[in-house]
Image (tube, helix red, strand yellow):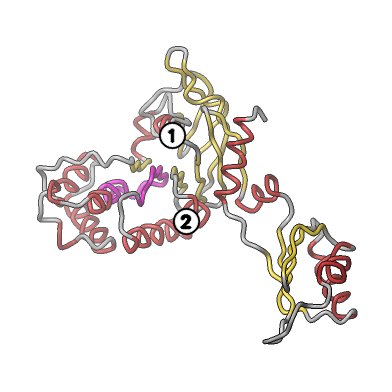
Amino acid sequence: MIETQGLTKRFGTLTAVDAVTLTVAPGEILALLGPNGAGKTTTVRMLSSILRPTSGRARVAGYDVAGQGADVRRRVGVLTEAPGLYTRMTGREYLDFFGQLRGLPSADRHARIDRLATRFRVASDLSRQLGEYSKGMRQKIALLRTLLHDPPVLLFDEPTSAMDPESARLVRDAILQMRASARHAIVLCTHNLPEAEELSDRIAFIREGKILALGTASELKARFLGPPLMELRLSIPPGTGPLPDINNGVRSTVARFATVEATGRGWLRYRTDQAATANPALLEALAREGYPVFTLSEVPQSLETVYLHVMEETDDGG
């Protein structure tokens, strides 16, 4: 649904987007993550045929962004971080106006407005002027504007910014439902890394206009953080003293199967790139040696850690 090859945009001597190559399939969400000024917004503007690429190419919904801009824009919904609403209009007037611009028939237009307003819980506010709306409500109206013509390609820039937790959850659920329908290709630009990890199928890190890394969250964690970090905990009866020599006995057993990273009273953390075979063998060895294993679990590693690692690596010239 989205395909770019060497997509580049220069403003004079500044290269804002530098040879970006990526694809997004129907039913897929690609998160585009990077610091301010990384090139995310410029990329979105080229994908929506607002800006013309300096070089390279991009096709959206089968149409070339440079040569078939009108066809692209009819099939794209863009949610910008700043809603840019006409604050003297009521919510209904504003959505109806944009529905007319999209060429939607009157009955269809009104039905869609009512359906979306009910879904995102702003139906009771549509008669009020947009200037009276809170920031979160304005973001919701901008989202309704984006979805009104049911475009197959959606480009979201900070879709839940300024929203309260309940509204943000509502929007995230709606995005997941759109993904599940397998009818939409979605690009998500956000600084909310937990949100990006929850929603996206793949993640692209971008800085100074270049894609630094691209893959699933699991692939990126494995690439930049190494094998999964496992935590082993022993059963400690209440009131007992120190456990029998965890630093020597348990540690030496674990070290036969994995790399030990840290130990404490009743726990130990290790890594292995052969977890499927090493973990069962390790548990069997500990049981045979009489160590009372209570739990073995993977320690969660956040996408934020990966993000900071990638950006620091770039700072160091890596």
Q: Quadrant of residue 211?
A: top right
Identified by mark 1, the residue type is: Asn
In the image, farthest residue toward the front: 241
* Other residues around mark 2 within 10 Å, as few (<14) / some (14–19) / many (≥20): many
Q: Where does the image place residue 63, in percent across and percent down from the top left?
A: 45, 33
Q: Mark 1 or 2 closer to N-term?
A: 1
110 vs 289, nearest the viewer? 289
Asked whether residue 167 is drawn in magenta, I would say no
Residue sitting at 66 percent across and 50 percent down? 219
Q: Residue shown at 37%/41% (left/top)?
A: 75
Which residue is pictured at 23% across the width and 38% down the height? 84
Residue placed most toward the observer, 4 or 302: 302
Q: Is residue 186 positioned above or below 4 on the image?
A: below
- Residue shown at the point (61%, 50%) measured from the top left: 216
Q: Position of residue 147 (x, y in %)?
A: 32, 50
Q: Is residue 258 left or right of residue 209?
A: right
Residue 49 is left or right of residue 274, and the answer is left
* 229 over 154 or under it: above or below: below
Gap in angstroms between the C-alphas marked 1 and 2 = 27 Å
Indicate the quadrant where residue 178 lies: bottom left
The residue at which mark 1 appears reads as 36
Callout 2 secondary element:
helix
Residue 53 % position (x, y) = 45, 22
Q: Which residue is mark 2?
A: 179
Choose top left, top right, bottom left or bottom right for residue 73. Answer: top left
Most foreground residue, 160 or 243? 243
Start and end of the magenta stretch? 142-160
Q: Secondary structure at mark 1?
A: loop
Q: Considering the image in quadrants, where does the C terminus appear?
A: top right
Amino acid type for the residue under numbered disc 2: Arg
**Residue 191 at x, y percent in the picture:** 44, 45
Asked whether 154 falls inside the magenta stretch, the response is: yes
